Amino acid sequence: MSNQSTGYCPDAGSWPAVADALDAAGLGLRPDGFTHEVAFRRCPACAQLNIVREEHFVCVFCDASLPAAWNVDPSAG
């Protein structure tokens, strides 16, 4: 189970909401968290969406530094 979504790009901290939805659906056993967590960041320099790989917080499009905190939703900042 992963938080990888090309549209919504949820933060890994969204797991509790996913767990609640799975429990409410009565699907039985579920993992204790995402089995594959993906870190999404929007580049503050060029606004491109990035997937952070191996804790390397650098934009693959323009080489700018990416923020440590999730920032995909422009209304959240």
Image: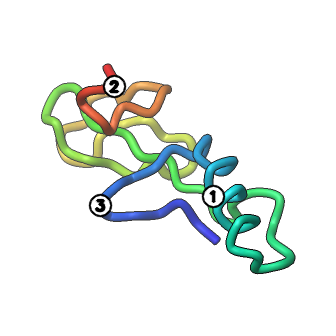
Q: Is residue 20 above or below residue 5?
A: above
Q: Residue 64: percent from the left, percent from the top? A: 26, 29
Q: CA distance from mark 3 to mark 2?
A: 16 Å
Give, as a three-letter code, the residue at label 1. Val
Left or right: where 5 falls relative to 59? right
**Residues at discs 2 and 1 in contact (Cβ within 8 Å):** no
Q: Residue 58: percent from the left, percent from the top? A: 36, 36
Give, as a three-letter code, the residue at label 3. Gly
Q: Secondary structure at mark 2?
A: helix
Q: Residue 1: percent from the left, percent from the top? A: 64, 71
In the image, what residue occupies the spot 62% across and 50% down? 17
Mark closest to the chain's N terminus, 3 or 2? 3
Left or right: where 49 falls relative to 18? left
Residue receiving disc 3: 7
Of residue 26 and residue 63, the one placed in the foreground of this image is 26
**Residues at discs 3 and 2 in contact (Cβ within 8 Å):** no
In the image, what residue occupies the spot 65% across and 51% down? 15
Q: Is residue 58 above or below residue 34?
A: above
Mark closest to the chain's N terminus, 3 or 1? 3
Are there few (<14), some (14-19), or many (20+) residues within 10 Å of tag 3? few
The quadrant in which the C terminus is found is: top left
Of residue 61 and residue 32, the one placed in the foreground of this image is 32
Residue receiving disc 2: 76
Q: Is residue 13 above or below residue 68?
A: below
Mark nearest the camera among 3 and 1 is: 1
In the image, what residue occupies the spot 58% across and 66% down? 2
Q: Secondary structure at mark 3?
A: loop
Q: Secondary structure at mark 1?
A: helix
Give, as a three-letter code, the residue at label 2. Ala
Residue receiving disc 1: 18
